[in-house]
Image (cartoon, rainbow, N blue to C red):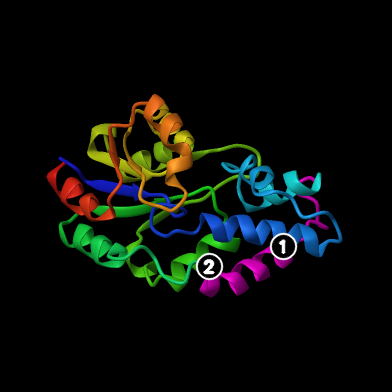
Amino acid sequence: MLKAVLFDIDGTLGDTLPLCVEAYRACVEAQGLPRPSAAEVVSFFGLSDRGVLGGLLGMSPEDAALPIDCFAEIYEQLHPLLAPEPFEGAVEMLRAVKAAGIRIGIISGKERYTAEPTIRRYGIAELIEWKGLGLPTHNCKHERLAEVMQEWNLHPDELVYVGDAPSDIELSHRAGVRIINAAWASTAEQDREACLALNPDWRLTNFNELLPLILSL
């Protein structure tokens, strides 16, 4: 019986990946450096906000001079322009999952600098019971899945993760957790082959198929 669903944010609850890419590019440019390509930015994804920014600037994510506040400010400024709303039906889906007695959490590579503004803007804070955010050193989603299973006393077959990236599939399987591969974002097609090669438990291209699947598990 399904007892919990853990959701990614970017590309899963909202079409926020273009926002993330543009905020990093603008922040680097604001430091007087050449604007990185989208591919350069994406190459660091999986790391947290400070990890990506540090990688792009050649700085330690722990460096006090890292312009993380500049990045966070740009992210919030661009949010209403590039990702003003979650995917249509996302809030209603979360409410229906919660009403069914299924616990809801977030596991994201984001840190508080970008996770909190997006959660707040999308009006979903009260629906999220647990948050496992990213680290600047490595993609830690399998560790976060292990943590939530321990804290909520769950067996791996009692939860499912919903995420869009190939690494989400790989790390969910490493944790022994089933994954619904979210393939409804504007950026999903570019990872199609990589995701399929990793054999997700389910791959959905239509967001409206998500709630019925969750409620059937």
- Dot 1 alpha-carbon crowd within 10 angstroms: few under 14, some 14 to 19, many 20 or more: some
- Residue pictured at 39% horizontal, 30% vertical: 175
SS category of the residue bearing label 2:
helix
Which residue is under mark 1?
A: 26
Q: Which mark is residue 85?
A: none
- Residue pictured at 39% horizontal, 44% vertical: 163
Q: Earlier in the sequence, mark 1 or mark 2?
A: 1
- Residue pictured at 17% horizontal, 56% vertical: 101
> Front-most of 43 and 215?
43
Q: Quadrant of residue 113?
A: bottom right
Which residue is under mark 2?
A: 82
Is residue 68 in sight in this rendering?
A: no
Give the side of residue 157 with respect to residue 172, left or right: left
C-alpha gap between disc 1 and disc 2:
13 Å
Residue type at mark 2 is Leu
- Residue pictured at 78% horizontal, 56% vertical: 66
Where residue 31 appears, as percent x and y from the top left, is 83, 61
- Give the extent of the magenta segment: 59-82
Q: Quadrant of the N terminus?
A: top left
